Amino acid sequence: MLVYLTAECCGYPISIFFIVVNEFCERFSYYGMRAVLVLYFRYFLLWDDDLATSIYHAFVALCYLTPILGAIIADSWLGKFKTIIYLSIVYAIGQVTMAISTIHDITDANRDGTPDNFTFHIALSMLGLILIALGTGGIKPCVAAFGGDQFQEHQSRQLNTFFSVFYLCINAGSLLSTLITPVLRAQECGIHTQQQCYPLAFGVPAVLMVISLVVFIAGSGMYVKTDPEGNIMWSVCKCIGFAIKNRFRHRSSSYPKREHWMDWANEKYDKLLIAQIKMVLKVLFLYIPLPMFWTLFDQKVSICHFSGLLGGLPDQMQTVNPILILTLVPIMDRLIFPLIQKCGLNFSPLKRMTVGMLFAAMAFVSAALVQIEIDKTLPNFPSSSESQLKVVNTYSTTLNVTISPNEHLLIESFGVQLHTSKHTYSTISCMFVNGYTADLNITNLDSIEPSATTNYTLVNQGKRDFVLRHGEQWCEFSRKFGFGASYTFLIPSTVFSDDCESITEVEDMKPNSVHMALQIPQYFLITTGEVMFSVTGLQFSYSQAPKNMKSVLQAGWLCTNAVGNIIVLIVAELGKLPKQWAEYLLFASLLVAVSIIFSIMAYFYTYIDPAEIEAQVRKEQGLEPEEMEKETLEMEEKDEDQKNEQGVKQTKI
Ligand SMILES: CC(C)C[C@H](NC(=O)[C@@H](N)Cc1ccccc1)C(=O)O
């Protein structure tokens, strides 16, 4: 037996320092790259919105599916230490490849600032992303489990704190990179022409991944390293296969029942392996309802988009979650959980996870309430049996418009009339209406022909300046924009003679009057839910796994996230309920239902100490006779005899 003497600091193994720093750098690398990925697709590769978001989601889903591969490699073949090193190298190569693919000068032969060979950049970036997905997902279940392996039996309290610190590092890394990489992208760089600096935005995450690898290797001499016990996953599969086959062979009621269906593998497989498989299966069964939590969690960011509360700030919203995690984890760990314990309540891990789910459900109820308030401020949209018509009068006097048979609209010169009628006309919307006699150029918009309109264009909140141009003539005007609002600008023929003064502004949709602060409870609730659910889940998966399958159970835990992500994509495809708030309430109710199911399952779950069970099985194996095996063999012989007898009878007939 290998005994490790680990160096300690304040009761913690020193090797942990290298592991948490490694995690911080790795998460910086991952989230930093992710923060600018869609921008790269949209503005460098010039993909449309749909393609960019589809490839982005496919990449994220792949990152959450590869942990299974990493766990199999670690537990069955290379061990966690070597798996982390090899897959980190793959990961770093992926990040460097990705950074190289963003250098426009490589293919910009005509030096116009855009790449000439998009196929080259696309191929390189796709290769980079595949390597990154393999690396980041592959090492994910191994790093947490490897961290746990560093603790001795007497350090169980420190082990729990480790998982909280580990989670803090994940979020510190993601917070910093989400803030920094978009700023790096906004810089200008290039050899021949100056462009937005994607190489820097992707290069810094690549450097952080190399640092992460170097830090991990630096701790090499201090780690507790456990070698895999042969191809464990293959043995597990064979053992489960045999148990099923054996159970089927002995389905007659004449055979005595066994406590667990896996006991049907007793004849051929080691009792220790069977006991370990039982532990893993029990936990995996418990995980079945959990993807629902992640489905809601992953939808959380979309709440902000759809509610329109934070219309222009999706980038910043990405930082709210890690900021709250950094504050809530210490509060929970140091204050709330000890307080609950002091009150004599047993707040076991599975109870925490259930409460975490309920918090997430409450977040969605809160989102629904905010949405109802927002809906009150929105204009009345036409129902399915109505359509809307907007008429803009650019004529010099008031006009009377008749809509057959007998509806009338009176529109002043340069006025707008919105009219709703049953089954008449379809909605016409615009941003700028050109009443000038010639083409006009407006800053950041294509030129507009006379009497034509532009599409609605998204503008940032606050005061914005516009410059109108036609040949040598120009004028400038400014307007203030509120979130969620929509405006139409009517440009008259006199626009240049009165220096843009005569431009008429029409407010099509009012700005949001619902305060942004109403968003805070949702975020607070869902992040409290995340701390209770996710940090506890990480600890639970480690503590309930047998020694030789720690990474596998971590991968199982991460799989709940992958399935949650896939459900989000399916739900998005299936479409939405007509009322946003109803959709939020539906999700909240589903999660409450799932948490009730989970709490029932949790009630029947008995916490185990895998090391104790393993020791007990070993002891039993040495002392007890194989009663059950003998019994089965006897029954099999009887069965065989019966069959032979029948065979003899049949031939006689
Ligand atoms: C354990 C989880 C499956 C993934 C974990 N994620 C987090 O810790 C998130 N709080 C990070 C985050 C950052 C920005 C916006 C939303 C979420 C991880 O990355 O390991």
Image (spheres, rainbow, N blue to C red):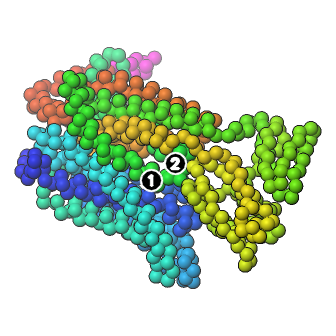
Queried whether the magenta region covers residue 636, the answer comes back as no
* Mark identifier at residue 41: none
Task: Name the outermost residue toward the right.
Answer: 405
Queried whether the magenta region covers residue 651, the answer comes back as yes
Amino acid on which disc 2 is placed:
Leu
Q: Nearer the viewer, residue 281 or 33?
A: 33
Regarding mark 2 in the picture, which secondary structure is present there? loop
Which residue: 50% across, 36% down?
A: 367
Which residue: 66% across, 64% down?
A: 477
Range covered by the magenta-colored residues: 641-653
Question: What is the spatial separation of the Cα atoms under label 2 and label 1, in whole angstroms?
Answer: 9 Å
Is 624 above or below relative to 194?
Answer: above
Which residue: 40% across, 48% down?
A: 320
Count residues near mark 1 (Cα–Cα under 10 Å), then give few for <14, some for 14-19, many for 20+. Answer: few
Label 2, on which residue?
Answer: 310
Query: Split into 4 quadrants, where in the image is the C terminus?
Result: top left
For label 1, being within 8 Å of ligand 1 is answered no
Left-right relation of 390 to 638: right
Label 1, on which residue?
Answer: 316
Q: Residue 87: where, in percent of width, then height?
A: 31, 59
Count residues near mark 2 (Cα–Cα under 10 Å), then give few for <14, some for 14-19, many for 20+. Answer: many
Question: What secondary structure is the stretch in magenta mostly built from?
Answer: helix
Left-right relation of 212 to 4: right
Q: Residue 100: where, in percent of width, then height?
A: 42, 72
